[in-house]
């Protein structure tokens, strides 16, 4: 019988690369980092204790490799699953895979990182956000709003309609009092009201105002949380224009700040 193959070689090659990646994570782990996870509401049962910057650094060395990401996900190791967000390939992600992984979520960090670093770059992001927005499981529902927040930052299409539809989902689900859901809803609203074009920003801020006056305590919290964020943004002084070096004329505008 032929050996099962992956995109990069036989199954044995995948196993070797999984071991190599896990060994790399273990070398970067510390007990102190592992013990600190509980402070952030992250279960440490399957964690090694690797700082996020080191997870990202290892991901850069490994490069994009979706077959490896799928194999690492199955290990259940917290940092290995975080690594998947940075080595996964958006064009190889399927809705079925998103569904499977989403049901494995047991913390907000893996949920948010996957949404922000991988899933929002897939062609399935809007559909999955819509589908998950009314899901009964807390972290699946959070993923819907983490996706909306991530798309508010990364979507380059320039289209307002999907983001305006996202505001409809936000308003509809603003009464879900579960901690990770309500914070995800607030994140999505704040992102829409600060990172999109004028039409979406205006609609998001109007929604925040409506929610802030709601009779429902959770909706009221979300609205006020968003309004505070918008007020802070407006209060920030504009960045001063870059000065040309003395005796020289600037030939191009300063670089835009990174997302």
Image (tube, helix red, strand yellow):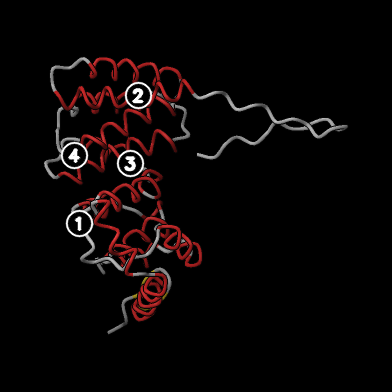
Local SS, label 3: helix
State which quadrant residue 44 falls in. Answer: bottom left
Considering depth in this image, is 48 or 31 the residue closer to the camera? Answer: 31
Position in image of residue 54 (x %, y %)? 44, 63
Q: Is residue 88 left or right of residue 212?
A: right
| Mark 3 vs 1, N-terminal side | 1
Q: CA distance from mark 2 to mark 1?
A: 33 Å
Residue with the mark numbered 2: 228
Q: Quadrant of the N terminus?
A: bottom left
Residue with the mark numbered 4: 179
| Mark 2 vs 3, N-terminal side | 3
Q: Residues within 10 Å of mark 2 (few under 14, many from 20)?
A: few
Q: Residues within 10 Å of mark 4 (few under 14, many from 20)?
A: few
Local SS, label 1: loop
Q: Nearer the viewer, mark 3 or mark 1?
A: 1
Q: Residues within 10 Å of mark 1 (few under 14, many from 20)?
A: some
């Amino acid at each position: 019988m032929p050996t099962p193959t992956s995109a990069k070689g036989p199954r044995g090659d995948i196993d070797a690369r999984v071991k190599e990646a896990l060994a790399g994570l273990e070398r970067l782990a510390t007990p102190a980092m592992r013990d600190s996870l509980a402070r952030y509401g992250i279960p440490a049962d399957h964690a090694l204790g690797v700082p996020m910057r080191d997870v990202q650094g290892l991901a850069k060395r490994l490069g994009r490799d979706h077959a490896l990401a799928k194999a690492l996900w199955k290990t259940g190791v917290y940092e290995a699953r975080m690594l998947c967000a940075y080595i996964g390939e958006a064009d190889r992600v399927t809705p079925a895979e998103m569904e499977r992984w989403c049901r494995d979520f047991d913390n907000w960090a893996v949920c948010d990182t996957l949404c922000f670093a991988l899933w929002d770059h897939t062609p399935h992001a809007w559909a999955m956000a819509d589908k998950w927005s009314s899901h009964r499981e807390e972290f699946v529902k959070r993923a819907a709003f983490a996706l909306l927040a991530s798309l508010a930052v990364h979507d380059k299409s320039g289209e307002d309609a999907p983001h305006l539809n996202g505001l409809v989902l936000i308003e509809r689900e603003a009464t879900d009092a579960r901690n990770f859901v309500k914070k995800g809803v607030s994140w999505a609203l704040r992102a829409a009201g600060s990172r999109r074009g004028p039409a979406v920003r205006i609609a998001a801020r109007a929604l925040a105002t409506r929610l802030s006056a709601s009779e429902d305590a959770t909706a009221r919290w979300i609205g006020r949380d968003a309004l505070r964020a918008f007020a802070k943004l407006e209060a920030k002084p504009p960045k001063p224009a870059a000065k040309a070096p003395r005796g020289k004329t600037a030939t191009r505008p300063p670089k835009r700040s990174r997302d």
